[in-house]
Amino acid sequence: MDISLNGRAALITGGSEGLGKGMAIRFAASGADIAILARRPDALAAAKTEIEAAGGGRVVTLPCDLLDAAATKAAFAEAESALGKIDILVNNAGTSRAKKFETVTDAEWEEDLELKLMAAIRLCRAALPGMKERKWGRIINVLNIGAKAPRAGSAPTAVSRAAGLALTKVLAGDGAPHNVLV
């Protein structure tokens, strides 16, 4: 199936590897301008080469630790400035750290929730007003099956993913009247 994203701009977190890079390549091949965020500049540089080879528009790479709220806000602003707008936001960053509940420390809970939930909240908060104003936007929050059917030993990831599912449902209702699909 051919999907045209000509004239669209996408920001993808965790875009230097795996699923995020795969989406960036596909979006670029469909004509979108791309901004990818990840922590490691070397991985971003390698991904940029692959994404540019797919064709499409501009590719912007932004080193960013999403655990840092100020850095996240600055990276979004830089991506928006470089691309002119953000039409598609993909919240993909995260790990699947799974442990028995009683072994998860407060620091591990905080880091997991910060990376998977709070970073997504911050980026959605930044992207949503422009999407609503333009009457077009797409927000993709990457989750896993643990969001709906957590298994034993899946803390903290299943809890943060479940929170991400709730966030997605809230945003879907808020965005729908403005043609912002979540």
Image (cartoon, rainbow, N blue to C red):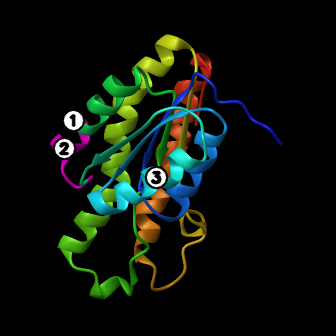
Mark 3 vs mark 1: give the one in front: 3
Give me the residue at 43% from left, 26% from top. 128
Near mark 1 (Cα within 10 A), the count class, few <14, some 14-19 or many ≥20, is few
> What is the number of the mark on residue 71?
2
Foreground pick, 96 / 50 = 50
Foreground pick, 84 / 146 = 84
Q: Is residue 141 visible?
A: no
Give me the residue at 30% from left, 62% from top. 42
In screen coordinates, is 8 left or right of 64? right
Give the structural element (helix, strand or loop) at label 1. helix
Q: Are the residues flagged by discs 3 and 1 in contact, CB closer than 8 Å?
A: no
Q: Are the residues flagged by discs 2 and 1 in contact, CB closer than 8 Å?
A: yes
In screen coordinates, is 72 left or right of 37? left
Q: Position of residue 60 (x, y in %)?
A: 38, 39
Q: CA distance from mark 3 to mark 1?
A: 24 Å
Q: Amino acid at mark 1?
A: Ala
Near mark 2 (Cα within 10 A), the count class, few <14, some 14-19 or many ≥20, is some
Identify whether 36 is placed above or below 177: below
Q: Amino acid at mark 3?
A: Thr
Which residue range is magenta in the image?
66-74
On the rendered image, what quadrant is the N terminus found in? Answer: top right
On the rendered image, what quadrant is the C terminus found in? Answer: top right
* Magenta segment main secondary structure: helix
> What is the number of the mark on residue 49?
3
Mark 3 vs 1, N-terminal side: 3
In screen coordinates, is 51 left or right of 82? right
Q: Amino acid at mark 2?
A: Ala
Q: CA distance from mark 2 to mark 1?
A: 5 Å
- Check disc 1 and report the residue beneath it: 74
Q: Position of residue 40 (x, y in %)?
A: 28, 61
